[in-house]
Amino acid sequence: MPSFLFAANYELKHIASTDAVFTTAPQFVNGERLIYDGYAHIDAAYGGSDYTALTCAKKQEDGTIVMYGRLWRKDVLSVLDEILAEVARLRCGLIRCEDNGDKGFLKQEINRQSGCNVWAKTYSESQHKKIKIETYLKQAWERIRFLEGTDREYIDQILDYTEYAEHDDAPDSAATVCRYFFTGHWDGK
């Protein structure tokens, strides 16, 4: 039995697979004000077994990235009120969402529901997910400080990420935000 399965089943603790990309423990920080005026990103699920992932983050003056993540195994529209509440609580005024799958529907729904507090903009994803995660999220990993209160399942999905992971919604969302911090572009071009 692999060590990560033994730890999960018998010691009730999480250890990533030996093929995992992220092998060091995540670091945490207190103080949600560190994310105020940051960015939010939604990796939307529209049914099936995918998750909806929310990432809120802000790059700090010292180069660290304070990040908060939530994960729902639900359709994005069924949790949109919760997403908007989290984004408002963390004072992220802009939500970025991909328009490849829904042709801008989620952006329109966010802008309709949120009034003037939060607004959404889309981007067209052009980069392969594996490359994005293994480039930008991996490059930023040692500088990321997860905000206390981040979903453990969100972090575990990142720690469990391999090229063949069944679910990669959290690392995809986190990598998209990190890519923006490194390149200034949301779309990978």
Image: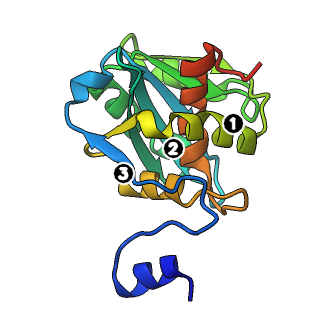
Q: Quadrant of the C terminus?
A: top right
Q: Nearer the viewer, residue 90 or 146?
A: 146
Residue type pointed to by label 2? Ala
Residue type pointed to by label 3? Asp
Between circles 1 and 2, the one closer to the viewer is 1
Q: Residue at x 78, y 38 (%)?
A: 128
Gap in Å between the C-alphas at discs 3 and 2? 10 Å
Q: Tell how many labels.
A: 3
> Which residue in the protein does label 1 denote?
132
Q: Is residue 42 left or right of residue 92?
A: right
Residue type pointed to by label 1? Lys
For mark 3, give the secondary structure.
Answer: loop
Who comes first in sequence, dot 1 or dot 3? 1
Give the quarter of the image for residue 105: top right
Using the image, tell me which numbered label, if any, was put on residue 53.
2
Q: Nearer the viewer, residue 53 or 143?
A: 143
The answer to whether residue 126 is seen in the rendering is yes
